[in-house]
Image (spheres, rainbow, N blue to C red):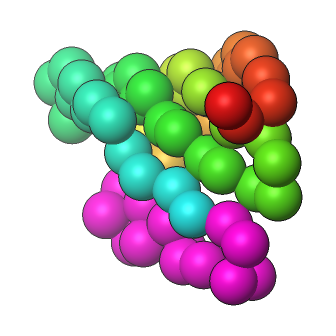
C-alpha cells in the first residue's frame, strides 16, 4: 500500500460527527516516515504521532503515541 492510499483511508469520514487530517508528514529515504495526525470524534480531539516503516513494499505503523482531550 502506498502511503498516500493509507492517508486517504485514514482521513475518510466514517461518521457525520468525526473528521481528521494529516498535520505533517516527514518521509526519510522513502522507507521511514513520521506523521502527525489530528482526529475529531464525537466530543474528543486526538493528536497522534505515528512512526511508519516500509516493510516488503508496504507502509507499516511501528509505533503510535496519542493524546486525547475534550473539545472546547
Place residue 66 in its image quadrant.
top right
Q: Whole-percent x and y of residue 3? A: 37, 56
**Apparent side of residue 19 relative to residue 57 in the rendered image (left or right):** right
In the image: residue 32, left or right of residue 68: left
Q: Work out whether residue 49 or residue 16 is closer to the camera in this orientation and state it.
A: 16
Residue 71 within the segment the image draws in magenta? no
Res. 37 in view: yes
**Who is closer to the viewer here, 37 or 46?**
46
Q: Is residue 7 above or below residue 72?
A: below
Residue visible at 79% across and 41% down in the picture: 44
Give the magenta-colored segment's residue range: 3-18
Q: Is residue 7 magenta?
A: yes
- Percent position of residue 54, x then y: 45, 40
> Number of callouts in the render?
0
Placement of the C terminus among the 4 image quadrants: top right
Question: Where in the figure is residue 4, as x and y percent of width and height?
Answer: 31, 63
Amino acid at each position: 500500500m502506498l502511503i498516500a492510499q493509507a492517508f486517504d483511508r485514514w482521513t475518510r469520514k466514517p461518521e457525520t460527527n468525526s473528521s481528521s487530517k494529516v498535520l505533517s508528514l516527514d518521509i526519510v529515504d522513502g522507507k521511514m516516515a513520521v506523521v502527525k495526525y489530528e482526529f475529531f470524534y464525537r466530543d474528543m480531539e486526538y493528536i497522534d504521532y505515528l512512526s511508519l516503516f516500509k516493510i516488503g513494499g508496504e507502509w507499516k505503523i511501528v509505533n503510535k503515541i496519542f493524546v486525547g482531550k475534550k473539545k472546547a
